[in-house]
Amino acid sequence: MFNPQDFGEKLKELRIQNGYSMLSLGKAIGTSASRIKSWEMGESVPSASWIVKLSNILQVSADELLLNILEESPSKGEKVFPKKRNVILNDLNILLHELDKKDLWELYTLAELKAMQKEVSL
């Protein structure tokens, strides 16, 4: 299941790795430092459009930013081979740029539902 605190920690880690302060990251994507802080503290969660902006500026896939939700194969629970995973993530990144806000929100919601189903089955 998606955890805002885990997301916030990942965002902070990537922000620091890329040499951004909260203020400079906020300016780079068109928002405020206080919003970045809120995301990093797990007080709020960015919408799909902010996820896309963050993934672009931090040079990671949306999947990596969302804590590798595609890391395991949904059918067998086995790890996806790195080359196949990279192809999947590249395709996903291209697709994300072609979707409108409604489509992105539906995709985000489906990913959360899938994660909840997986957690319940464990």
Image (cartoon, grey):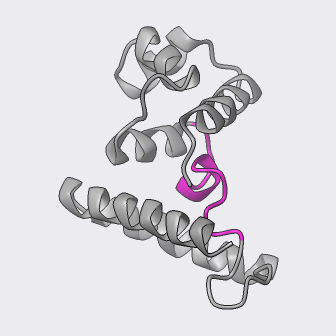
Nearer-the-camera pick, 122 or 42: 122
Which percent across, then down, holds residue 18?
A: 70, 29
Nearer-the-camera pick, 32 or 110: 110
Which image quarter: residue 21? top right
Which percent across, then down, holds residue 61?
A: 59, 55
Is 113 displayed left or right of 90 in the figure?
left
Extent of the magenta region: 58-71
Is 2 displayed left or right of 48 in the figure?
right
The N terminus - image quarter: bottom right
Q: Answer whether residue 34 is magenta in the image.
A: no
The C terminus - image quarter: bottom right
Q: Residue at x 66, y 59 (%)?
A: 68
Q: Residue at x 68, y 82 (%)?
A: 73
Nearer-the-camera pick, 112 or 46: 112
Q: Chief secondary structure of the magenta span?
A: loop
Which percent across, then down, holds residue 99?
A: 27, 64
Q: Is residue 96 above or below residue 11?
A: below
Q: Answer whether residue 65 is magenta in the image.
A: yes
Which image quarter: residue 94? bottom left
Q: Residue at x 30, y 59 (%)?
A: 104
Is 21 displayed left or right of 23 in the figure?
right
